[in-house]
Image (tube, rainbow, N blue to C red):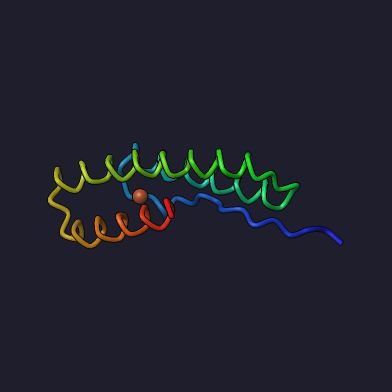
Amino acid sequence: MVAETLALEWDEKYSVGVTVLDHQHQQMFRMINDLVNIIQGVPEKERIGRLLDAIIEYKRVHFATEEGYFKEFNFEGAAEHIWNTKNLMRLLRS
Ligand SMILES: [Fe+2]
């Protein structure tokens, strides 16, 4: 029996049309895939903790980058997105 792997695969349909944001989203896909691989292998609490810390830090940087673009382009969904990201960050830190 072959174990199923849960891998996130980037697709151009996820592009937001801003290269730096697409690259950050692709990096998050890789980090989540790394986390899944660790959990599916021999999960080591310390490794998982370090990767989760790295993901949280990367998301913090990413959200700050996104907010800069929201202001620059007067993105009308900014308030809702910011509210959602703040809730996600609170959840990740808990
Ligand atoms: Fe994003």
Looking at the figure, which quarter contains the C terminus?
bottom left
Give the x, y percent position of residue 23. 41, 39
How many numbered markers are drawn?
0
The quarter of the picture where residue 85 lies is bottom left
Give the x, y percent position of residue 87. 33, 59
Residue shown at 63%/51% (left/top)? Answer: 36
Q: Nearer the viewer, residue 12 or 45?
A: 45
| Most distant residue in the right direction | 1
For residue 14, side relative to residue 69 (left or right): right
The quarter of the picture where residue 21 lies is top left
Give the x, y percent position of residue 42. 75, 47
Residue shown at 67%/51% (left/top)? Answer: 39
Residue shown at 26%/58% (left/top)? Answer: 81
Image vertical order of residue 41 relative to residue 46, above or below: below
For residue 1, side relative to residue 67 (left or right): right
For residue 64, side relative to residue 93 (left or right): left
Give the x, y percent position of residue 29. 51, 47
For residue 63, side relative to residue 77 (left or right): right
Looking at the figure, which quarter contains the N terminus?
bottom right
| Most distant residue in the front direction | 94
Q: Nearer the viewer, residue 93 or 58?
A: 93
